[in-house]
Amino acid sequence: MARPSARSASINLRARPGQRALIDRAAATLGKNRSDFMLEAACREAENVLLDRRLFDLDSDAFAAFEAALTAPTTDNPALRRLLQGAPPWDD
């Protein structure tokens, strides 16, 4: 397995002592250090923010293509139909 590259960018922030203690307790509960805990939590929240975007701008040509894709009739996809009709893996 390839080893992930070393972290080279720093992120600094200030917290109140109570916030730091709360983060440290939660990190210890998960067996993580503060940096790993905070980085994972921040990245998870960043992904959620970006995935939850509901407004995006398109020029008129891009919007026309987008609208055409949304309104186009679907094509039959037997492999997808089989997948959706099968039992989910967590039910096995």
Image (cartoon, rainbow, N blue to C red):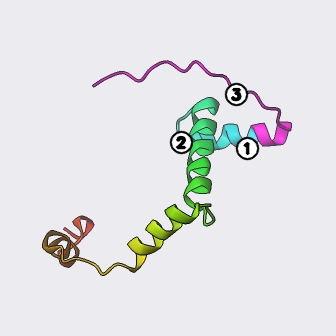
Residue depicted at x 86% and y 38%? 16
Which of the numbered marks, if any, corresponds to residue 30?
2
- Residue 67, position as x, y percentages in the image: 47, 73
Question: Which is more N-terminal, label 2 or label 3?
Answer: 3
Picture quadrant of residue 68: bottom left
Nearer to the camera, 64 or 39: 64
Secondary structure, mark 3, is: loop
Report whether 4 appears left or right of 51. Answer: left
> Which residue bears the numbered disc 3?
11
Q: Residues within 10 Å of mark 1 (few under 14, many from 20)?
A: few
Picture quadrant of residue 29: top right
- Magenta span: predominant SS is loop
Q: CA distance from mark 1 to mark 3?
A: 19 Å
Which of the numbered marks, if any, corresponds to residue 22?
1
Nearer to the camera, 91 or 25: 91
Secondary structure, mark 2, is: loop
Given contact means CB atoms under 8 Å apart, are the residues at marks 2 and 1 in contact?
A: no
Residue 9 belongs to magenta span: yes
Q: Which residues are magenta?
A: 1-20
* Front disc: 3 or 2: 3
Q: Looking at the picture, which amino acid does disc 3 mark? A: Ile
Q: CA distance from mark 3 to mark 2?
A: 22 Å
Report whether 87 appears left or right of 25. Answer: left
